[in-house]
Image (cartoon, helix red, strand yellow):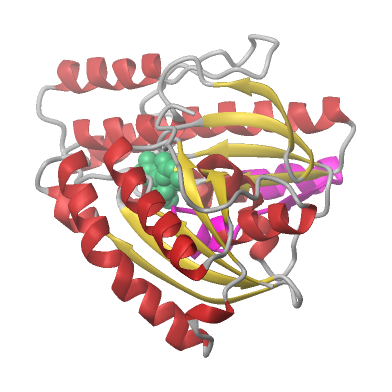
Amino acid sequence: MLILGIESSCDETGVALYDTDHARLLAHALHSQILMHQDYGGVVPELASRDHIRRTIPLLHKVMSDSGHSLDQLDAIAYTQGPGLAGALLVGAAFAEGLAASLEIPVIPIHHLEGHLLSPLLSRRPPSFPFVALLVSGGHSQLMRVSDVGQYELLGETLDDAAGEAFDKTAKLLGLPYPGGAALSELAQHGQPDAIKLPRPMLHSGDFDFSFSGLKTAVLTKVREIGTPSEQQRADIARGFQDAIIEVLVKKAMRAVKESGLKQLVVAGGVGANRELRRQLDARAVRAKIDVFYPELEFCTDNGAMIALAGALRFQAGVSIKPAGAFAVRPRW
Ligand code: KG4
Ligand code: ZN
């Protein structure tokens, strides 16, 4: 079976084709709008929707030609139904539903976070069910117990800002361009450990929830105290921030794995691309005798491949399949 996947929830248009018979991603294509939004310091929803309209058809043609398949061979189309920007989601949903209706094949609406959660299954060394997942993106920070496709138990989540959001807001305070997560982590490499000591929010709260907005405020206070930070002070602040957020993520994730009695931790979402987070988790995992799994770097941030995969797994399980036609997006799902 050939499942097409379409992602358009925010500022990336992704299209991919997955073959369920060979459990293999056949082709994928991505267009990132980051440069377009950078001048505004964040994603402009109306510009995002319009750009998804421009990009989707060319990306579809590229995926079909790269895979060597034709549209009439498709068996179903999966698309991101939510959460995300309403207008952006509508572009992908309308496109997927329209194409599926014309081909007389079903659709599989997918939760964006399920895509992230399952994305490590696309890698050469995939995890097996069940596992604990740390999902850290621009919009969410959650710890989950994943028993099987569609069987997810929320263990804890952020009470305010998401981890990626905290990275981006702190990066902005340090004058880095949007989205600043990766740039902030580069800058942190030049910072001194403990030169700037920041709070570890909810580290000892005894649950699996997070809170990152106070950390961002602590950075703001430091920047104001200093006035105009030197290059070294900016790097020290970046280091202090990254050390604080990673310590909380690592401690809580490792405790969740221990308490679950499971032996596998999956890390997904844009912040999962962070090298220092990976280094610390890998070191702790060796001591705890557990395995940590990450998506390939290109599938950490938003992409169509994870939506095609989630659609393929749901299609195989016989769930969430519906005839093309009437549809609604779920921006706050
Ligand atoms: O998963 P994603 O592409 O989008 C959402 O679904 O939100 O995640 C994007 C987020 C952004 O906040 C970005 O700054 C952050 O992931 N990010 C990073 C790194 N690469 C991307 N944060 C920290 N370190 C990185 N290397
Ligand atoms: Zn995402």
> To which quarter of the image does residue 146 belong?
top right
* Residue 40 image offset from top left, x and y in percent: 11, 42
| Picture mark count | 0
Residue range corresponding to the magenta coloring? 280-307
Residue at 44%, 55% in the rendered image: 97
Task: Look at the image and say whether residue 18 sits in the magenta stretch.
Answer: no
Specify the quadrant that holds the N terminus: bottom right
Question: Residue, x 42% and y 33% (percent of image)?
Answer: 139
Q: Horizontal placement of 325 versus 283: left or right?
A: left
Q: Quadrant of ligand 1?
A: top left
The residue sitting at the top extreme is: 205
Residue 70 visible to the viewer: yes
**Residue 331 vs residue 112: left or right?**
left
Q: Residue at x 31, y 70 (%)?
A: 57
Q: Quadrant of residue 214?
A: top left
Residue 303 sits inside the magenta stretch: yes
Q: Residue furthest right?
A: 261
Provide residue 13's location: percent of width, then percent of height. 35, 59
The x and y percentages for residue 225 are 18, 16
Residue 333 placement (x, y as % from top left): 49, 29
Q: Nearer the viewer, residue 48 or 129?
A: 48
Q: Is residue 274 visible?
A: no
The one of 207 and 305 positioned closer to us in this rendering: 305
Q: Is residue 291 above or below residue 175?
A: below
